[in-house]
Image (tube, rainbow, N blue to C red):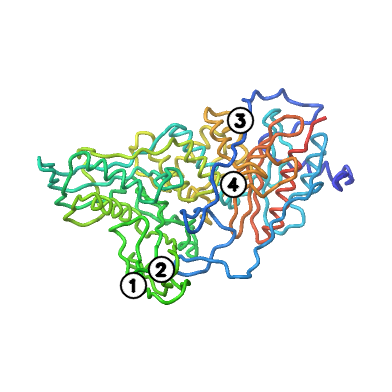
Amino acid sequence: MVPESLKRPLAALLAIVGCLGATLPITSRAQASPPLAVAPTPAPRASTQPGVSAKTATPVAKKPAAASKAKGGVHSRKKGAKRAPRPIPAKGAWSTTVGASALTAALAETLPGPVKGRWGAMVVSLTRGDTLFSETAGSALMPASTMKLFTSALALETLGPQHRFSTEVLRDGVLAADGTLRGNLVLRGDGDPSISPRLLGGAPGDPMQRLAKEISAAGVKRVTGDVIADGSAFDDKGVPDGWRKRYLGAAYAARVSALSLNENLVWIVVKPGPKGALVSTDPATAGLPIESEVRVVPGRGGRISAWRRADGSIKVKGSIGASAHERRWSLVVEDPALFAAGALRAQLEELGINVAGKVRTGRGSPVAPRIASLASPPLKEIVAAMNGESINLFAELLFRNSARGPLRDNVGSAVSANNALERFLSGKVGVDSGAVHASDGSGLSTLDRVTARSLVKLLAYGHAASWSPEYHASLPVAGESETLKHRMRFTPAQGNLHAKTGTTNDVISLAGYVTAKNGELLAFAMVYNGRDRWRAKDRIDRAGATLAAFSRE
């Protein structure tokens, strides 16, 4: 199949090449620069995240194609409603090009194509060092979840792939010989995203159970004071600037806190009992009041609604059949630190450790001794989960932890993290000042801006960095894993192209790496802002397959 782009007059091709203003220059075969020395490309990572059941596991906290308008945090698709089509390039829908000029022409035909909106795109050969394509690569655009590439790189560069977070329990008081703690227990957060079944396995309450057992092993049998939730490692801004209000009841927009549990989501569990409906939370927590008006009725069905009140409590109403199975609904927790400390108290009481005081927020004494701790998996595993399933909360916590640094001597905030990112990009990556602005670390904010050129420069730096294997391995693989599992199947990109996706109502983006047919490694970024995102997605996938089918000779 001969692409229509090859039939264009030579004058059009020269006009395209003349418009390329990339910092990384285009070099023709007649003036090719010496090849860049590059490290071997690590094998793309296969998916390790199983599908998530709405009844058995925490829902994936990622950005959807469209925000649900359901109230109260309970979201479902109406029976019979049709999903938007997922355009997948059919075999032959891409271009097989030979030579840099032919690839440039083919990509110019594909991007932007007949799609209304704003585009930014760039393709660079990391093997040869030349720019193969550039379309308004300096335009500042909303990145959606390709922002996580910046967050990943900043965290890996600042903290290192083996870094572990540590959630601790402090004894703020005197422990008597009879096991009475005359004082408070302080649960101090370290910005650990992993305290959930996704990475630790088990049930949502298991992390707090582990801490409670350590507290018991330390000799504590009774607490006269309070359980204090200390989330002071971060500022108290739980919702980043630029997050739309309609997102805030959804799992992908969970609140940000240095003390998080179960990705800051709580399951409302309803089942019939002999004397009425049994309504509880999973994990069990003393920090989340529930008022139930659920009735038990004959049958196996159920009509239940649950929502958060302004004061943070939960109201549950409706009915459940006497023969019905357990039903579950997830809600976003408004105060994550209080929620986590309440779950610790519930586990302490389960072990028979009485707490006389209440659950409250506060700060622990810097000299209070530690009596229990929970370490996270290595940072590389957290980054892999974050990029693979595009988990916004993981990105927000890693973004702020990067600002705190390995010594944990700064308070994490989106502002300080953006400043740290700017220093990293200008000082090490070579990105122009102002090319990137991050109001958050996930890309959910409508205030985020990046350029295609800045993404490609970041990818080039990440490929050469000491943490390159972890960076490559964190990215989904076309046609095979995670957010790219159903894209570019049956094309040359399948099993080859590995990249970070980005999707919101107004953005489709893709940035990452692909190996061309002749073996050279290409870094690319394609960002679209507009309402025609389904056709834009199709164009991006066609371009990705075209890159995989490219060869120099």
In contact (CB < 8 Å): disc 3 and disc 2? no
Q: Is residue 244 left or right of residue 204?
A: right
Task: Give the mark nearest the N terminus, 3 or 2.
Answer: 3
Local SS, label 3: loop
Q: Which mark is residue 42?
A: 3
Distance Cα–Cα, label 2 vs label 1: 20 Å
- Which residue carries the number 2 mark? 307
Q: Amino acid at mark 1?
A: Gly
**Residue at which label 1 appears:** 276
What amino acid type is highlighted by mark number 4? Glu
Q: Tell me the distance, in whole angstroms, between the alpha carbons under discs 2 and 4.
A: 30 Å
Q: Upstream in the sequence, badge 3 or badge 4?
A: 3
Residue at the image position 40 percent from the left and 54 percent from the top? 264
Secondary structure beneath label 4: helix
Mark 3 → mark 2, Cα distance in angstroms: 46 Å
Give the amino acid type for the residue marked by disc 2 in the picture.
Trp
Separation (CA) of disc 3 from disc 1? 57 Å
Q: Are marks 2 and 4 in contact (CB under 8 Å)?
A: no
Q: Earlier in the sequence, mark 2 or mark 1?
A: 1
Mark 4, residue position: 482
Q: Are marks 2 and 1 in contact (CB under 8 Å)?
A: no
Sooner in the amino-acid sequence: mark 2 or mark 4: 2
SS at mark 1?
A: strand
